[in-house]
Amino acid sequence: MNNKTAHELHNELKNKKISSVELTEAVFAQIEKVESKVQAFVTLTKEEALKQAKAADERIENNHNLTPLTGIPIAIKDNMCTKGILTTCSSKILSNYLPPYNATIVEKLKEAGAIMVGKTNMDEFAMGSSTENSGLHPTNNPWNLNTVPGGSSGGSAAAVAADECILATGSDTGGSIRQPAAFCGVVGLKPTYGRVSRYGLVAFASSLDQIGPLTKDVTDTATVLNIISGHDPKDSTSVNISVPDYQKSLINNIKGLKIGYIKELLGKGIDKEVKVTIEKAMKKLAELGAELIEVSMPSFEAAVATYYLIAPAEASSNLARYDGVKFGHRSKEAKDLLTMYYNTRQEGFGTEVKRRILLGTYALSAGYYDAYYLKALKVRTLIKQDFDKAFAECDVLISPTAPTVAFKIGEKTADPLSMYLSDIATIPVNLAGLPGISLPCGFSNNLPVGLQIIGKAFAEETILRVAFTYEQNTDWHKKKPQL
Amino acid sequence: MQIDIDHVAKLARLGLSEEEKKVFGEQLGKVLDHANELQKLNTDNVSPTSHAIPMKNVLREDKVVVCQNTEDILANGPETEDNMFKVPRIVE
C-alpha cells in the first residue's frame, strides 16, 4: 500500500480499509528493505511516527477534524526545524542540533495529522545539485543506484520514488525541489516566493529559498500545497494574500491555453534525448488543445553566473551564525575567540559550503561589490523583464527541468562549474520568484526526464492545471523503479 | 582570474589548509571567469533587484514576551553557565 498516492490512501483510510498504523508499518517495512541501497534518510523517527499514526487512527475513527493528510506518512527535508528531533542540514557543524521549535510547515503538517517518518538527506545546507555534498553520506537514485538522485532535496525525491514515504517536503533555492524530482521521476513544485512560510527553514539564500512538496502525482502536490501555503506573521517575507483551493485547479482541460516553450532551453547544452523527450511532451500538450508559442529569453545565458554570485553572497551572510557560540559544533582547539571561529568553521563546513562562503564573501568585498554583486542584481532585473515579456503573451512557459538525466555519482564533483551549469533551466525561476513544477514526461537511458512548467507569480493554479492535464493523459507518473 | 584567497578567508573567518587554498583558488578563479560574462550585458539605467516580489518592511508592536524554552535553547550551547553561553576570554 506504500506505493499508492496520498489521495488513494486517504480514501482507504476514511473507508477503514486500512489503518494509519498499518500504512506507517508498511512504509517502515519498505525502508527496512531498500534503505541500505537508497540511503535517503539521515534520521528515522519510527517510534514517534507510530504514536502519531495511532492518534491519526483515533481521529479517523471519531471522524474528527479530518484532512486529506490525516494518517499519511511524510518525510521532511533535514533543513526544516523539528522540535527535539535532529536537524542537521546534512552538515557536521549541525550534527548535534536539536531545534527548540518546529518550522511553520512542520507545525501545519502535524496539525493536519500527517505522520513524520524521518528527515531526509540533502546537499549540505542545500548547496548542490546531486546530494553528493551531504556531510553525512550520499543518496543513490532508485532508478539506477550508480547515479545521483539530484539535489539538494535528493533524499526527499529518492524516498518518494522508492516508496519509503508517501510524500516529502523539499526546499528550492535554484532548483533543489524540481531537479531531484526530475531525476527521480516524481512531481516537485516550487511555489512563488512568499507563498509558503520559511520560518524554521535553515536559511541558505533568503531572497530565493522556498519550501514545496515532492509527491507521486499532481493531485498530491495540490493537497500538500493547500496545507502548507499562506501568510505567517513569523516570516516577514511571506505574502499576505488569500490562498485558493488548489484542488480546484485540477482541471483536465487546457484548450486554448497559451504555452510558451523557451528557445534557449532547447538548444546548446541540452542533451539530445532530453530535447526529443520534451518535444514529444510539447506535441502532446498541443494535441490536448494548447497553443504552443516559441519565446526567447536572451538573459538566460547569464542566469547561472547571476545566481552563483547572488546565492553565495546571501549564504556567506546567513552562514556567519555558525560561529560555535550558541549551537552546533565548536572546535576543541579554541584558545581565543578568533581561533574558535576559524577552527569551528574549518572543521564543521564541507568543501562546497566553504567554496560558496568564499565566493560570496569575495563578491561582497570592498572593491568587487559593484562589479560582481551589484552587477548580478541588475542582471536579475533583466531576467525578470524577459519573463514579464514572455508572460505578456503566454499563460505558462515550459522547458526541460534539467539539461540531462541523472548523471553518474562522482562525474561532476571535481569541476564545480560543470555542476553549477546543470541548474540552467531552474535557476532563472528562483531569480524571478516564480512558481515552477517538474513532472515526469518520459525516459532517456532508462532514467526519468522531467518537464518544467513555469507560471506567473502566484499562478500556481495554472501550472497545476497544465500539469494535471498532461498527467491524466499520459502514464509516466505510474512507472516505478525496480529495487 | 586570481583571487587573494587569504584575504577572503580572513573576511569569512574561515580556516583553510594549504591544499584547500590552492584548490579553491583555482576553482573560484574559473567560476569568476564565467561570472565575467555578466559584463557583456548592458545594464546602464537598469535598477538592481534584491527581491523578486515587492517587499516592504513589516513592523510589529514592541512588547515583551517571556521566552518559554530557555532550557532547550541553552541545551544546544557548546558551553554554558548559569543561563549564559560561555566563550573564550575576549578582553585581557
Image: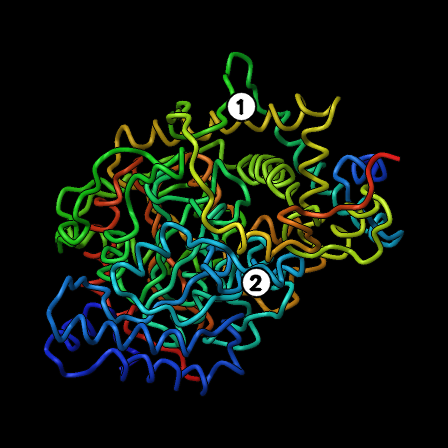
Residue A165 placement: quadrant: bottom left
- Kindly identify the amino acid type of the residue bearing the numbered disc 2: Thr
Which element type, helix, strand or loop, lies under badge 1? helix
Could you tell me if residue A451 is visible in this image? no
Q: Earlier in the sequence, mark 2 or mark 1?
A: 2
Residue A72 position, x and y percent, is 27, 70
Mark 2 falls within which chain?
Answer: A
Quarter of the image with the C terminus of chain A in it: bottom left
Residue A442 position, x and y percent, is 35, 66
Above/below status of A242 relative to A446: above
- Kindly identify the amino acid type of the residue bearing the numbered disc 1: Lys
Above/below status of A289 relative to A300: below
Identify the residue at image location x=59%, y=57%.
B75
Residue A262 position, x and y percent, is 38, 41
* Residue nearer the viewer, A72 or A175: A72
* Residue nearer the viewer, A57 or A129: A57
Could you tell me if residue A125 is visible in this image? yes
Q: How many marks?
A: 2
Which element type, helix, strand or loop, lies under badge 2? loop
| Disc number for residue A131 | 2
The residue that label 1 is drawn on is A378
Above/below status of A240 relative to A444: above
